[in-house]
Amino acid sequence: MRLHRDAQNAVLGAFGGMFGGAGLGWWLAFGESAVSLGAGSEAGTAFGAGVLAAVAGIRWAVGKWERAKRRWMDDAQRVGEGLKRDLKVRIKTVLQWTRLIVQ
């Protein structure tokens, strides 16, 4: 459940980063405050800043997904080790009981 939730958050974060980057690029190139102040960026610079923000958002989402996946794999390994220990104890217990019944 936690992995599913983290995956959804990563996807939403990636889309947020992409749309935020596109919005930043548009705002830098054509934003009202930039045009009125005479500080509008050139199209290439604005596009570059938008792409940089979008790629940073995607990279953040990929990192978040990898951390969530690593935590999930660690949890699965711990559960597997615990099950293996429990199974060994149960087998020993059953074998001891069967020896008592046979004798």
Image (spheres, helix red, strand yellow):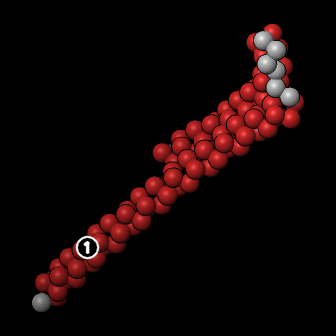
Say how many tags the image has: 1
Residue at 51 percent across and 51 percent down: it is 68
Residue at label 1?
90
Residue 76 vertical placement versus 14 (above, below):
below
Q: Nearer the viewer, residue 44 or 22?
A: 44
Q: Position of residue 60 (x, y in %)?
A: 60, 44
Where is residue 63 shown, x and y percent of the image? Answer: 58, 50
Instruction: Judge the density around disc 1: few (<14), some (14-19), many (≥20) Cα neighbours within 10 Å.
Output: few
Judging depth in this view, the residue of 99 and 5 nearest the camera is: 5
Please tell me whether mark 1 sits on a helix, a strand or a loop: helix
Q: Residue furthest front?
A: 38
Q: Is there any visible trace of residue 36 in the rendered image?
A: yes
Give, as a three-letter code, the residue at label 1: Arg
Q: In which quarter of the image is the C terminus?
A: bottom left
Q: Single out the residue that lies furthest toward the bottom.
A: 103
Tell me: 32 left or right of 78: right
Q: Position of residue 94 (x, y in %)?
A: 23, 77
Instruction: Name the side, left or right, on which 17 lies relative to 29.
Output: left
Q: Is residue 41 left or right of residue 90?
A: right
The reply to whether residue 11 is in sight is no
- Compared across the picture, whether 93 is left or right of 59 comes to left
- Residue 58, quarter of the rendered image: top right
Name the foreground residue: 29 vs 10.
29
What is the quadrant of residue 97 in the picture? bottom left
- Residue 40 falls in image quadrant: top right
Q: Which residue is drawn at 82% across and 26% down?
A: 41
At horizontal 49% and vertical 58% (from top left) the residue drawn is 70
For image coordinates 48% across by 45% down, the residue present is 2
x, y (%) of residue 71? 46, 55
